[in-house]
């Protein structure tokens, strides 16, 4: 394998930043009490309104434990996780799963149906074929035949979840909840904060964000969306109302290069090939689990398929940056009102023709 053939892989564990990040508007972000920690190979931050500052350390520690607990159950990188066991026992026998895993698997299947298979948490074998999830990056693009063979192992409808057990019917099938687990983690952290009386906070787990209340009186939480073509810049800011969530999926964070071509870590489970045509997708909706799954699904269907999917989730707001030059932003009408584009950025409302 020559160095030209495999130029670069960006392994999951070095992915430290998501597509969105918290930014202040009428105040500096750094003025607010904030703590960060690492979990699931990436970084999470918890920001609270000033009057909760004294409780921040204890609250963050508790959230870290929640995230670590979820990672130990659901990581595709840990041989002893429930998800890895589920994959190993494919075609053998059902395994018992915890309530967390049961919930995430059920939600993953739900989003599979909603997106007509654009979101598919059984895409694990395809991830591996394309050099992700710890697999070696193939020196050459997999053959059509290889893609077709592996595709036979991918179908979210074949996962059985029943009475606290889960089962994949065919040996070689593999579950990968990487497109939804961080959002679920954020929702659990959100519920926890509310349960202990913290009312004004923002949790950001690698671009999966959920906010509550306000950063200070008369302001709203502002989320900067990263420019997918220049990570040092933002393309604009979104005001995030308390209670709602936002997630960004981008092809610029994690990808492999095979024979000089770059392939994204989001795979189109309908074709078996890495999704193309989209640079980043940001979804704003009611909870972080939905935002996470939908950002992955919209990344797969792209601007062309966005309208059909939006009809199924009319309350979601969407910002798509197609992988084209010059950069253009496509937004749903509702987001137009809360999105403040950077001055140099051209944006237009997503229309059925786009
Ligand atoms: P990130 O995890 O980088 O923030 P996403 O939330 O978009 O980005 O999730 C991408 C992850 O989802 C991949 O790393 C993989 O684990 C999984 N995945 C890839 N393609 C799909 C797909 N079509 N449906 C569901 N999950 C997917
Ligand atoms: Mg996602």
Image (cartoon, rainbow, N blue to C red):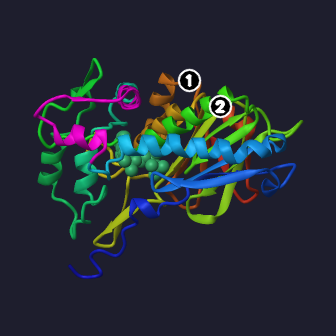
| CB contact under 8 Å: marks 2 and 1 | no
For the residue pair 264 and 197, the one nearer the viewer reads as: 197
Residue drawn at x 65%, y 26% as measured from the top left: 195
N-terminal of the pair, mark 2 or mark 1, is: 2
| Residue 154 x/y as whole percent | 22, 39
Q: Quadrant of residue 71?
A: top left
Q: Is residue 298 above or below residue 254?
A: above
Q: Is residue 154 left or right of residue 218?
A: left
Q: Please give the residue where the numbered disc 1 appears in the rendered image.
A: 314
Image point (12%, 46%), residue name: 149
Q: Would the CB of label 1 be found within 8 Å of ligand 2?
A: no
* Residue 80 visible at all: yes
Residue 240 lies in the magenta stretch? no
Q: Which residue is mark 2?
A: 244
Taking depth in this image into account, of 180 and 34 the one nearest to the observer is: 34
In the rendered image, residue 152, in percent from the top left (x then y), is placed at 15, 40
Distance in Å between CA atoms under marks 2 and 1: 15 Å
Q: Which residues are magenta?
A: 80-108
Residue occupying the far top of the picture: 163
Which numbered circle lies on residue 158? none
Q: How far across and down, in percent of the image, does residue 348 sit?
A: 65, 43
Instruction: Locate residue 307, reporting x and y percent.
Output: 49, 31
Relative side of 305 to 187, left or right: left
Image: 204 above or below 324? above
> In terms of secondary structure, where does tag 2 sit?
loop
Classed neighbour count for the residue bearing mark 2: other residues with Cα under 10 Å, few (<14), some (14–19), many (≥20):
some
Relative placement, left or right, of 101 versus 323 is left
Depth order, front residue of 277/284 = 284
Give the SS element for disc 1: loop
Examine the rendering and report whether any part of residue 353 can be seen. no
Residue at (41, 30) in percent of width and height: 100
């Amino acid at each position: 394998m020559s160095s030209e053939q495999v130029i670069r892989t960006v392994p999951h564990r070095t992915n430290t930043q998501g597509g969105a990040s918290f930014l202040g508007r009428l105040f500096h972000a750094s003025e607010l009490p904030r703590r960060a920690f690492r979990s699931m190979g990436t970084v999470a931050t918890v920001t609270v309104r000033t009057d909760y500052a004294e409780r921040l350390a204890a609250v963050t520690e508790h959230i870290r434990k929640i995230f670590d607990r979820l990672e130990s159950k659901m990581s595709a990188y840990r041989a002893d996780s429930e998800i890895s066991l589920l994959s190993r026992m494919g075609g053998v026998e059902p395994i018992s799963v915890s309530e967390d895993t049961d919930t995430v698997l059920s939600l993953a299947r739900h989003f599979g149906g909603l997106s007509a298979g654009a979101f598919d948490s059984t895409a694990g074998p395809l991830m591996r074929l394309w050099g992700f999830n710890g697999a070696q990056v193939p020196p050459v693009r997999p053959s059509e035949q290889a893609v077709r063979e592996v595709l036979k192992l991918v179908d979210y409808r074949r996962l059985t979840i029943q009475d606290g057990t889960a089962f994949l019917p065919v040996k070689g099938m593999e579950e990968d909840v990487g497109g939804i687990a961080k959002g679920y983690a954020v929702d659990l952290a959100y519920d926890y904060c509310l349960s202990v009386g913290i009312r004004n906070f923002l949790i950001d787990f690698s671009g999966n964000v959920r906010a509550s209340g306000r950063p200070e009186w008369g302001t709203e939480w502002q989320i900067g969306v990263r420019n997918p073509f220049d990570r040092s810049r933002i393309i604009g800011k979104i005001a995030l109302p308390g209670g709602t969530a936002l997630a960004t999926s981008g092809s610029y964070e994690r990808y492999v290069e095979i024979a000089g071509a770059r392939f994204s870590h989001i795979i189109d489970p309908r074709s078996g090939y890495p999704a193309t045509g989209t640079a980043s997708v940001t979804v704003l909706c009611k909870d972080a689990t939905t935002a996470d799954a939908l950002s992955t699904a919209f990344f797969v269907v792209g601007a062309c398929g966005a309208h059909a999917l939006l009809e199924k989730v009319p309350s979601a707001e969407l910002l798509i940056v197609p992988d084209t030059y010059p950069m253009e932003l496509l937004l749903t009408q509702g987001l137009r009102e809360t999105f403040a584009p950077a001055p140099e950025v051209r944006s237009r409302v997503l229309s059925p023709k786009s």
